Image: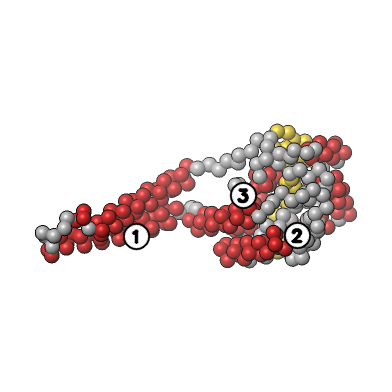
Amino acid sequence: MDISVVIPLLDENGSLKELHDWIASVMQSNHLSYEIIFIDDGSSDDSWQIIYLLSQKDPSVKGIRFSKNYGKSQALHAGFEMAKGKVVITMDADLQDNPDEIPKLFDMIEKDDFDLVSGWKKKRFDSVLTKNIPSKLFNWAARKTSGVNLHDFNCGLKAYKNVVVKTINVNGEMHRYIPVLVKNEGFNNIGETIVKHQARKYGKTKFGMERFINGFLDLITIWFVSKFGKRPMHFFGSIGASMLIIGFIFALYLGIDKVFFNPFGRLITQRPEFYISLTTMILGSQFFVAGFLGEMILRSRKDKQHYKIKDRVNI
C-alpha cells in the first residue's frame, strides 16, 4: 500500500463525507493505493455514524472510535499503530488541510528520501490575534529550543515514512512536537513544504488560547526530556552536587571559625550560615535522590498509551 491517511477528529460530522470524497479523488487520479483511517476521539455528534456508512461503501475507509475524548496525541498514536502504507500522511478533518497536497508530500518521502515532511501554512485564514501571532511566537520558541528549523510545528498536514511512525511514541499533548520526537529518535532528514491553508467550512475550532499556554509548558517538558530524558542523574545530580558543595563550604567555615577564631562566641546554631548550610545540604541530598529515582524509573518503565477503543470498522 502506498499511503495511509490518518485523520483524528472530534465533532466534525459536517466535513467528513466531503473530505473522504476529495481524498479518494486525489488518490485515484494519481493511481495511488491507499487507506483512510478516521480516529473518532469521543465525538458527541454523529461523526461515527458517518464514518461507518463511508466504510460500508468504500473498503479503504477504516475507523477507530474512542470511548471518550482522550486528545489528539492519543488519536494519532492509535492511527499510527494501524497504518500499513509505505507513507503515512496526517491531516485534520476540518477541511483546512488540502488533500491536493498529498501527491507532493508522497513524492518528497519516496523520491527525496525525507523521513518527515511537515506542512507550512504560510498564508493562514485564521484570526490574527488568537491564532496567527501566538502561533508565530510558539514556532519561534520551538525552533530555538529544539534545534529543528521548521516554520510551522503544529501544522496537521505531515508525511512520514512508515518506520518513523512505528518508532515514535506520541503521548500527552506532544502532537505539537512530533518533529522533535522524530529527531530525538535519530531521524534527522526532516523537510518542510508550503501547503495551502483553507478557511474552516463547517463547525468551529476545538482549540482556544489555552492551547498555546499548554504548548509552551509542553515545550519546556520536551526540552528537558530531549536533553536529560535518558540521563536524569546528570541534571539532578549536578544540581545536588553543587548544593552539597555549598553546604559543606558553609559548614567547614563555621567549624573552623568556631574552633580557631571564636570559641566562646555565639553557638553555631545561632548563626544564619548554619541554616544556609543545613538547607543546601538537605536540598542537595533530595536532588540526588530524585536523580536516582529517575534512573530507576527510566530502566523499569514501559510506555503505555491510555485510551480505550469503543468500536472499529474494517480493522
Q: Give coordinates of residue 199: x percent, y percent.
A: 80, 57
| Sequence-wise first label, 2 or 1 | 2
Front-most of residues 217 and 75: 217
Q: In this view, does 155 lie above or below 298?
A: below
Tag 3: residue type? Answer: Glu
Tag 2: residue type? Answer: Asp
Q: Give coordinates of residue 167: x percent, y percent.
A: 62, 49
| Sequence-wise first label, 3 or 2 | 2
Q: Which of marks 3 and 2 is in front?
A: 2
Q: What number is the disc on residue 173? A: 3
- Mark 2–mark 1 Cα distance, whole angstroms, equals 48 Å
Circle 2 residues within 10 Å: few <14, some 14–19, many ≥20: few
Considering the image in quadrants, where does the C terminus appear? top right
- Mark 3–mark 2 Cα distance, whole angstroms, equals 22 Å
Q: What number is the disc on residue 126? A: 2
Q: Left or right: where does residue 200 sit relative to residue 253?
A: right
Tag 1: residue type? Answer: Ser
| Sequence-wise first label, 3 or 1 | 3
**Residue that protrudes farthest toward the left in the picture:** 264
Q: What element carries label 3?
A: loop
Q: Mark 2–mark 1 contact, CB under 8 Å? A: no
Front-most of residues 102 and 45: 45
- The answer to whether residue 287 shows anywhere in this view is yes
